[in-house]
Amino acid sequence: MVSCRSCRSELKLTLIDLGSSPIANNLIPSTQSMEEMSCFPLCAKTCENCSLVQLSEELPRETLFRSDYVYHSSYSSSWLEHSRSYVTKMVKFLNLSENDLVVEVASNDGYLLQFFADSKVQVLGIEPAAGVANLAIAKNIPTMIEFFGVTTAKKLTKNPKPKLIIGNNVLAHVPDLHDFIEGFSILVADEGIITFEFPHLLNLLKNNQFDTIYHEHYSYLSVTALLPLMARYKLKIINVEKLPTHGGSLRVFIAKNESNWATDRSVQIMLKEEAQYDPRNKKIYESFQKNILNLKSNLVNELLRGKESKKRIAAYGAAAKGVTLLNYCGIKSDLIDYVVDLNPNKQGNFLPGCQIPIVGSDTLVTNPPDILLILAWNLSNEIKSQLLNQLNGGMKMLRAIPNVEYF
Ligand code: JHZ
């Protein structure tokens, strides 16, 4: 029996079964590497009791968040801008000063805490992937290199309690949600605030974002599913904001039950909205499954049509979600010549499973494609503005999410 990682009920309902896929961020150094052969089941199930969507089989977190973890948060200027404006808002909202401590869990390369440090607020990052953590340390962002949970929270009780703890795009990455949330409840100050940002399940369902399903994402989140989990650790969701990032995310504000923070009406409004797209509703999951099959056939047909008419096809953004898309659709290096990514740590490697080489942006000039499939569709605007020269030269940009279209 597979049980829900939040409420422990038996998981019976399949939201989508994507077969098996390689680990998205474990890029392979050569096409001969054995690692490209290892695929693992990728099936998302819904808990009929608490509605949490989650993978039915999990890989150990140490396999996923290794010291050579390739996702660096600082390679998107729009994401950095998003982070900077959050910091400005929170410094004002919580009246943060040099006497206050802000902690970020999964602080990556220090992309966010650097802005709090600029405002002279004390900061601490907690990040298990040593490679990115060391980049943060090099920027003078104190960072503990470990997975967060109750053990880490207890180690920190000697410090002043943080007025703000942040978890951006990390809740989905946590196999043991109980240990993780309990850790936050231990660490946060009595009148402190926790904010979590995560891609919203509602957008995954509405906008066919099935490619965001990969092993790193153990859970697919909604306010409906989070409320009972928070309640168990005497925490309450007091506010919900909608964000445009990562295809549509939520930022939830959380406080201790017994704190003086009141609950905003945005929480009830969001619960109502989510009820209309309940992943337990047969109509919802059946139409989602149908849409994904259609999308697969439309994308493969479009690329085959391009190949038949001798078009050169490349992709942009060696994003983790691109690995799910290409492997699920069976698209390999016979259809796509290369994928461009600005992160030098990704360049020189191959996307796992589909053996597509990752190259720098200069290849777009030396070997320009006719069609460019944007795998990082969430960053379309930012990418489009960089590629104006090539677009004027006749290159067309294609995306698969939410539907297969040129844009
Ligand atoms: P991007 C990430 O997923 C990481 P991914 C993570 N798994 C998560 O949880 C979700 O977000 C929410 C590159 N790029 O952000 C940088 C350019 O080359 O869509 C990245 O490699 N040129 C933690 O991996 C990739 O594209 C550019 O101009 O699906 C984008 O990856 C820009 C803007 C980006 O995330």
Image: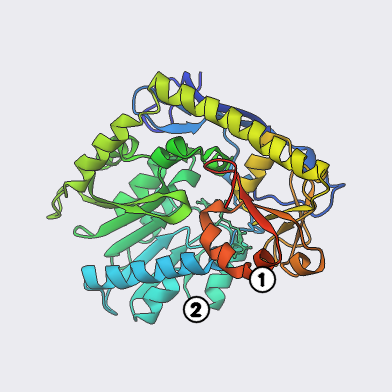
Q: Residue 335's x, y, as percent?
A: 79, 44
Whether residue 146 is visible, yes or no, is no
Side (left or right) of 343 relative to 165: right
Q: Which mark is residue 101?
A: none
Q: Nearer the viewer, mark 1 or mark 2?
A: 1
| Rendered image quadrant of residue 383 | bottom right
Q: CA distance from mark 1 to mark 2?
A: 38 Å
Residue at horizontal 31 percent and vertical 30 percent from the top: 276
Q: Is 59 in front, or is 291?
A: 291
Q: Is residue 123 above or below residue 18?
A: below
Q: Residue 220's x, y, as percent?
A: 45, 39
Residue at horizontal 53 percent and vertical 64 percent from the top: 382
- Under circle 1, the secondary element is helix
- Under circle 2, the secondary element is loop
Residue tagged 2: 140
Q: Is residue 364 above or below residue 349?
A: below
> As shown in the figure, which amino acid type bears the numbered disc 1?
Asn
> As shown in the figure, which amino acid type bears the numbered disc 2?
Asn
